[in-house]
Image (tube, rainbow, N blue to C red):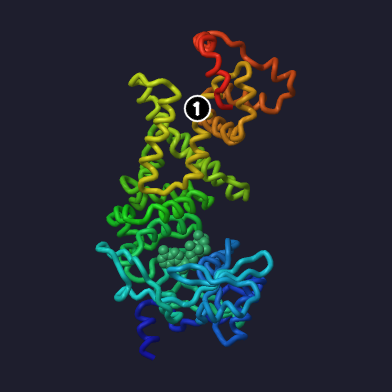
Amino acid sequence: MIKRLIRRVLGLPAEVRVPRGQHELTRDAISPATARVCAALRAAGFSGYVVGGAVRDLLLGITPQDFDVATDARPEQVRPLFRRAIIIGRRFRLVHVMLGAETIEVSTFRAADPETAEKDEHGRVLRDNVFGTQEEDARRRDFSVNALYFDPQTEEVVDFHGGLADLKKRVLRVIGDPETRYREDPIRMLRAVRLAAKLGLTLDPATREPIRALAPLLERVPPARLFDEMLKLLLSGHASACLRQLRDVGLHKGVLPLLDVILEQPLGERFVTLALAQTDERVLAERPVSPAFLFAALLWHEVLAAWKARQARGERAMPALEAAMDDVLETQCAKLAITRKLTATMREVWAMQPRFEQRSGHRAYRLVEAARFRMAYDFLALRAASGEVPAELEAWWRAFQSADPETRKAMLLPETGPRKRRRRRRKKRPAEAASQPA
Ligand code: ATP
Ligand code: MG
């Protein structure tokens, strides 16, 4: 009774369990494997709900990326129920159930009691690893629309925080006191921006307001987590919208060097805008995108500026480019753990750009045959589209790569003019010229 009254005062629906008919979700919207997992949990006497992003997306008419299941069963009680299931995770254990081609993540209801959780001096939660009730599990989640549970058997939605109403109003709202929740985990500020942009939701004023002042807290987040979240943001298919939103809420300046670069650069603005638009287009068309390509694009004008500065100080072109790449990657990787595999590809793509200027003799052939030619060429195309290099250069390489041997031969430019100096040098040191890497 009292509970109901409190809920009404808080503007929450009186009943937590919302029966079918009062919401749009039906059991045939969820994947067969997910339905089987929930049914097996039920049959063993436990609860089994679809939870989180999947419920939210389905209610918005969006196809979910994956299905997560929440239950009151402990991991060691879940695993024996399935033929192929493993317990993963050290900090928080959950079960991966493999059914056919699908992997369903099953997690046990968890409490994140802010009183007992271990925190740093800014309120960031370092450890929260206690099992709890469904209600506690809902409270630890970030946004009301992310705290909805769907029971495939009864087709009820369990809604402790007014998530259904917020979805109807298309509002993204933090559960609890926004400032406290951002202090516990500053990544939630980036998630707010990403989810709002991706789902077309508006940030509730109270959810939006504290972000500007709390932005510096992102500096304390481990670089690997920041990288994961930035990658999600950039590959969400709504990167352009996310970045506009980041600027609007005050999450740019000084927080992440990468954001400064993206949002503040006067030089490469057109280039970055094109790169992001192209990425969004590819993601939405479900074509593959390369994170390395995207990061290389986002940082290209930084590299260019550093390269020019070094050359102006008298350094030779290629060593100066190598050093410029080091400068830029060092700054970026301090805060954002861009993986080594990614930076290696970024370097290759950058280092190949000057080679597109050379359209004579065997150099052109060697470039076309290089392992990363396709990516490097796409990069060149972006540079041409942004007006950085002549469109004619891109057109030449586009034609050259698909031309037959005869045409290719006819296309090659004569080795004249500025090439002379190099030829002279090559004569002096023939061994070095011949062993240049392709
Ligand atoms: P998407 O998968 O579309 O990126 P999502 O909301 O499913 O969005 P996940 O990272 O898959 O995001 O997280 C699953 C669920 O876990 C979320 O819906 C939310 O309930 C909870 N969650 C994730 N990250 C946090 C966080 N930082 N703080 C609190 N709850 C979180
Ligand atoms: Mg998800």
Amino acid type of disc 1? Gly
Q: Is residue 396 left or right of residue 269?
A: right
The response on whether ligand 1 sits within 8 Å of label 1 is no
- Vertical placement of 144 versus 318: above or below? below
Q: Return the x and y of residue 96 as percentages of the image width and height.
A: 57, 69
Q: Return the x and y of residue 210 as percentages of the image width and height.
A: 30, 59
Residue 165 visible? The answer is: no
- Vertical placement of 424 versus 401: above or below? above
Which residue shows up at 64% across the image and 66% down it? 102
Decide: few, some or many residues near mark 1? Use Cα within 10 Å; few <14, some 14-19, many ≥20. Answer: few
Which is nearer the eye, 193 or 348? 348
Q: Quadrant of the N terminus?
A: bottom left
- Vertical placement of 192 versus 36: above or below? above
Which residue shows up at 52% across the image and 34% down it? 348
Outermost residue to the bottom: 1
Outermost residue to the front: 431
Outermost residue to the left: 121
Q: Is residue 305 left or right of residue 49?
A: left
What is the quadrant of residue 405 in the picture? top right
Residue 225 visible? The answer is: yes
- Vertical placement of 313 versus 211: above or below? above
Q: Quadrant of the C terminus?
A: top right
Which residue shows up at 54% across the image and 46% down it? 280
What is the quadrant of residue 268 in the picture? top left
Q: Return the x and y of residue 354 as percentages of the image width and height.
A: 51, 24
Q: Is residue 199 left or right of residue 255?
A: right
Q: Label 1 belongs to which residue?
A: 387
Q: Return the x and y of residue 68 as percentages of the image width and height.
A: 55, 69
What is the quadrant of residue 410 in the picture? top right
Which is nearer the eye, 320 or 431? 431
Which residue shows up at 52% across the image and 45% down it? 291
